[in-house]
Amino acid sequence: MLFVGDDWAEDHHDVELVDDQGRILARRRLPEGLGGITRLHALLAEHAPQEWADLDPAEAAAQVMVGIETDRGPWVGALVAAGYTVYALNPKSVARYRERHSTSGAKSDTADAHLLAEIVRLDRSHHRQVAGDSPTGESVKVTARAHQSMIWDRTRHVLRLRAALRDFFPAALAAFGDLDEPDTLALLAQAPDPDAASRLSRAKIVRALTRANRRDVTARAEKIRQVLTAPELRQPGPIQDAYAAIVSSEVALITVLNAQIERLGQVVAEHFGRHRDADIYTSLPGLGVILSARILGEFGDDPHRYADAKGRKAYAGTAPITRASGTRRVVLARYARNRRLGDALQQWAFCSMRGSAGARAYYKALRGRGVGHQAALRQLANRWVGILHGCLRDRTFYDENTAWQQHLNTAA
């Protein structure tokens, strides 16, 4: 075999090539892009063992083991497409290996390339290969992640808007509902400070509520106007003007994010709808299109990636970890996990109780034993991951009685 350590940067790759015995065969700095990957192929062909002459190209390529600290991008895609066995190594794991080889704290790109090559040569059985996800599955992942990131960005801006209003215009928090709603944003765009808000006419408020399809518009408009015109403490004029500028900026950003989140959500739905597993995911209670796309994207769709349900649960971060030393043994939640997947699974567990009697019974049984709300949701999510794995493995739709028969019988 040949082992390649690839320490990547934005515009280049430091590559080291070693053989089975750990002898360094070559070191190169290759440019990012087609030229660099072509030179890497040539370098591997130059140092290919004589035994490879009897192998077909696919078998020979599989004898190349590549270690790199990323699992995405065109360079990694080219390595996988060439047939090489690629390991996407966790940077935290690589850092621990670095400490093992050098306690001084010294670090260089060349040394990291050597370290990556040694990891795949000596310890590759403890690391995961880059998943062979389909292009459709990868497109679902990319769009779902972007959509989720936009929602997180909107939440940050909403919190900043709330903080600014609390400091100089608390009446707005009492008058309006959620700060990312269209009617609230429209009114704050017209009246970003207490003085302008007190001058808002009832007709303008009614128009904003009507465009947002609110109910009981007249009564709601009157209530908003009463709150905005009531006497309250004010900041000095210059400070109020500064805060008003901040509010206007945040309102504009949130408005744009709302539109882009809606647009990108449609793109996520389109890509997810073309996936072969879409109907299986949406057959499970609590999973809509967006949440299904997030979970599918993070799990991937390589059918050979997870050997069993336990492996999928461990990757999801829903399975607990055990720490044992001597006579002491403690079971803890797994916090080192894929944050995006963990967030989606937690939402799934919560939403599933509305559509699944079995999930609701399981949650209530956990709460009855004194388990806290969040811990019960984690355990419920763990059960759902196992059920999802079974559905995907057997290519079957969800069945409530099969999934929760024991808990349904106990609840009855």
Image (spheres, rainbow, N blue to C red):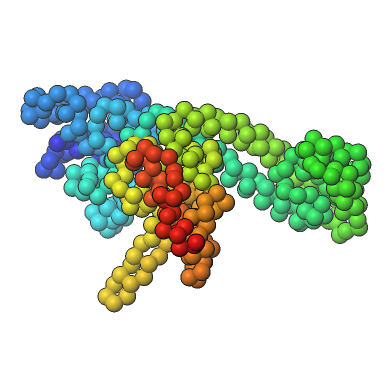
Q: Residue at x 36, y 70 (%)?
A: 330
- Image position, residue 122 (x, y; %): 18, 47
Q: Residue at x 58, y 34 (%)?
A: 265
The total number of labels drawn is: 0
Asked if one can make out residue 71 in the rendered structure from this viewpoint, the answer is no
In the image shown, does 200 or 167 lie closer to the viewer?
200
Quarter assignment of residue 148: top right
Identify the residue at horizontal 63%, vertical 43% (top origin): 154
Of residue 108 and residue 402, the one placed in the foreground of this image is: 402
* Residue 184 percent coordinates (x, y): 77, 44
1 relative position to 15: left or right: left
- Residue 166 spot, x, y in % from top left: 75, 56
Pick whichever, 334 or 256, lies toward us: 334
Q: Is residue 49 visible?
A: yes
Image x and y of residue 102, in percent: 25, 55
| 282 displayed left or right of 186 | left
Left or right of 410? Residue 21 is left
Q: Quadrant of the image for the N terminus?
A: top left
Q: Which quadrant holds residue 50?
A: top left
Q: Is residue 156 above or below residue 145?
A: below
Residue situated furthest bottom in the rendering: 327
- From this view, report whether residue 64 is shown above or below residue 358: above
Identify which residue is drawn at 48% across, 44% down.
284
Say whether residue 278 is left or right of residue 34. Answer: right
